[in-house]
């Protein structure tokens, strides 16, 4: 499985694009989140929407779903095909009612299913998206009373998307076989809705060695050499995960 971050930036970063990923297994290409900057960033990577096999959404903040309107419209009017949307069951209605409805509705086109091939996912159950690519969504702590999901790929790769510091969960996942963690990282305290770098630096070294930082602010360079045993994911670089 290969992963390329189309962006590694926080919601407010300007040097880095929104923290969205491209996962490739065999010939299957899955976008993980589709934020405000994604359409341009994907284009700059030389990839068009029609080359994707689907998108998986973690939660409905703009840096994770703000590019979906363009994705839907391009697929409808340029490529004449509905994109596949993998999304936790609990997010289907809010994604439409609270985010996409205003821009996409026109004439007889009036529901999410008119624009996407919607594949609702049950959390906590491993679901095969394609041969060699299984995902398990787990609801994690981000914004109070708003569902947000982190993703375990193939039982071994944990991608937080956005979540607050939860060292017990990380330890449990490592005990269960997770060998690589991509974790969102807020450089300055207080984190409030994300883990801060200082919090992540308090993790046991064995977990830090498995952890890569993403979703960071523009000042990440100033923290070079100060991330303990954790490494920093670079956007546009393809990493091979086993
Ligand atoms: N209670 C909140 C809610 C949001 N935010 C900021 O807004 C951003 C929305 O995208 P995000 O990537 O979840 O990061 C959030 C915080 O920076 C925040 O700082 N505090
Ligand atoms: Zn975010
Ligand atoms: Zn968020």
Image (cartoon, rainbow, N blue to C red):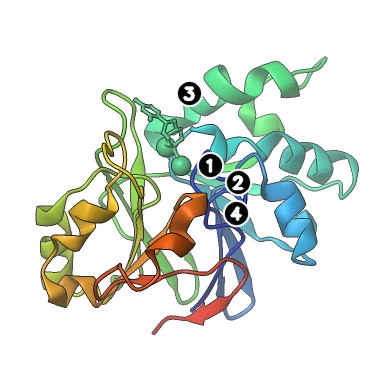
Counting residues from the start of the chain, the first of labels 1 and 4 encountered is 4
Percent across and percent down for residue 165 are 21, 47
- The reply to whether callout 2 and callout 3 are in contact (CB within 8 Å) is no
Q: Which image quadrant is residue 178 in?
A: bottom left
Q: Earlier in the sequence, mark 2 or mark 1?
A: 2
User: What residue appears at the point 33 percent right and 26 percent down from the top-left corner?
Assistant: 146
Mark 3 nearby-residue class (10 Å; few <14, some 14–19, many ≥20):
some
**Which residue is more in the foreground, 178 or 185?**
185
Q: Residues within 10 Å of mark 2 (few under 14, many from 20)?
A: many
Question: Looking at the picture, how far across and down is residue 121, in whole percent?
Answer: 41, 46
Q: CA distance from mark 1 to mark 4?
A: 14 Å
How crowded is the residue under tag 1: few (<14 C-alpha within 10 Å), some, or many (20+)? Answer: many
Residue 64, labelled with which disc?
A: 1
Classify the position of the C terminus by image quarter. bottom left
For residue 176, say whether it is visible. no
Residue underneath mark 3: 94
Is there any visible trace of residue 104 in the rendered image?
A: yes
């Amino acid at each position: 499985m290969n992963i390329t971050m189309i962006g590694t930036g926080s919601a407010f970063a300007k040097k880095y694009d929104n923290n969205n990923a491209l996962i490739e297994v065999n010939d299957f290409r899955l976008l993980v989140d589709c934020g405000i900057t994604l359409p341009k960033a994907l284009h700059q990577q030389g990839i068009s929407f029609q080359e994707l096999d689907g998108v998986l959404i973690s939660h409905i903040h703009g840096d994770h779903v703000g590019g979906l309107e363009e994705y839907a419209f391009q697929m409808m009017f340029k490529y004449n095909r509905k994109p596949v949307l993998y999304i936790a069951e609990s997010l289907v209605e809010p994604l439409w009612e609270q985010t996409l409805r205003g821009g996409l509705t026109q004439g007889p086109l009036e529901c999410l299913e008119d624009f996407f091939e919607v594949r609702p996912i049950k959390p906590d159950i491993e679901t095969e998206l394609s041969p060699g690519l299984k995902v398990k969504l787990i609801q994690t702590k981000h914004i109070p009373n708003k569902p947000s999901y982190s993703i375990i790929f193939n039982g071994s790769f944990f991608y937080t998307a956005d979540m607050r510091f939860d060292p017990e969960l990380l330890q449990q996942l490592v005990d269960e076989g997770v060998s690589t963690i991509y974790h969102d990282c807020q450089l300055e305290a207080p984190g409030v809705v994300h883990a801060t770098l200082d919090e992540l630096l308090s993790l046991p070294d064995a977990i830090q060695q498995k952890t890569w930082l993403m979703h960071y602010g523009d000042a990440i360079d100033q923290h070079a050499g100060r991330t303990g045993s954790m490494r920093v994911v670079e956007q546009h670089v393809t990493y091979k995960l086993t």
